[in-house]
Image (cartoon, helix red, strand yellow):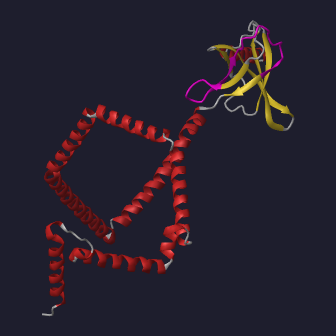
Amino acid sequence: MAGGLLLFFVGFNFLKGFHPFRSYTSYHVVYSDVSGIVNSSQVIVNGLKIGQVENITTLQPGDARQLVVTFTVNKSIKIPVGSVIKISGTDLLGNKALVLIPSSAITYHNYGDTLKGEVEESLSSTISAMVSPLKEKSEQVLITLDKVLQSMNDVFDSAGTRRIASSINDISWSIHNMRNITQRIDKLTESEYSKLEAMLQNLESITRNLKNNNEHIARSMKNLARITDSVAASDLTATINNTKRVMDEFATALNKINNGEGSLGMLANDSTLYLNLAQTSKELEFLLKDMQEYPARYFTISVFGGGKRAKKQDNERSGKNTTKP
């Protein structure tokens, strides 16, 4: 009976890959979650089975937050320091195993060491992580679509339909006005084209004349510059000073005249002298007139009795002048 049980146990473990005649070493790894890992779960490296899980227990008695997984591997397999034991899925059915990810170190763990453990995300968690953003975006799209549909319902009710029709009519009227404005602009452009062409030709002619007479313009500018230089170089200060001196002398002379100094001053300020001169001038005028009319009174000419004849003529002229009509 005992032999049968022993034979059954050995055969069962042999079928699971455990060879009782080979030597194995044990290692430990700590996880916070060992979902999918049970006793006899495989330990794999690069797809090759090298051992199996022997025991799963808590790190602290009664504290299930940290779980210790003890696994055995073939004694010929050495695990480099820094290697990772990751709980990873082996198929789409959800079966999991401990996958050894060896490091590049050249030193190795001792038997019974505790290795670093990691947990690979499950397919469902990966899909959930991928689908979750799509789900959120889909919800946002559905909310936006609902708002759009609600807005469309508000737009396409009876009042909204009338507003749309009115807007379309306004757009049509605006397009019609734009067409009329465009036609008017076209007509204006056609009627004013000749004027614009003439203006451009005149402008071209002006620029051509300026270009052709550039030398003359430059020469005129040089002459103007030379004239301005000559004016600037002339002794304007001396001329202004002489003019000022002449004006001062003229002002002095006028002051003397006003004050009665000199002949001109006495003449300008003494009315008696002016009257005497006027009277003398009048008497001199009468004297000259009398000498012209009666020269015999002032000159005696005795050549061949000329004096007597002149005196006779004077008497006759005098008698005529004294005879009343």
- Depicted 202 relative to depicted 166: above or below: above
- Please state if 305 lies on the left or on the right of 45 as rendered: left
Looking at the rendered image, the quarter that the N terminus falls into is top right
Residue shown at the point (47%, 50%) measured from the top left: 141
Specify whether residue 142 is in view.
Answer: yes
- Rendered image quadrant of residue 162: bottom left
> Is most of the magenta stretch helix, strand or loop?
loop
Judge whether residue 89 is colored magenta. Answer: yes
Identify which residue, 51 or 239, lies in the foreground. 239
Residue 38 showing in the rendered view:
no
Nearer to us in this view, 101 or 291: 291
Nearer to me, 281 or 195 = 281
> Which range is magenta?
88-115
Q: For residue 112, what is the image quadrant?
A: top right
Q: Position of residue 145 (x, y in %)?
A: 43, 54
Q: Position of residue 257 (x, y in %)?
A: 52, 69
The image shows residue 22, relative to residue 85, as above or below, that is: above
Q: Residue at x 23, y 37 (%)?
A: 209
| Image location (x, y in percent) of residue 8 | 71, 17
Q: Position of residue 146 (x, y in %)?
A: 44, 58
Above-or-below relation of 128 to 74: below
Left or right: 201 with respect to 56? left
- Viewer-nearest residue: 37 or 317: 317
Residue lying at the far right in this picture: please name it: 61
- The quarter in which the C terminus is drawn is bottom left
Measured along the vertical axis of the image, is residue 219 above or below residue 85? below
Residue at position x 37%, y 64% in the image: 153
In this rendering, position of residue 35 left or right of residue 279: right
Residue 180 in magenta stretch: no
* Direction from residue 286 to residue 151 in the image, left or right: right
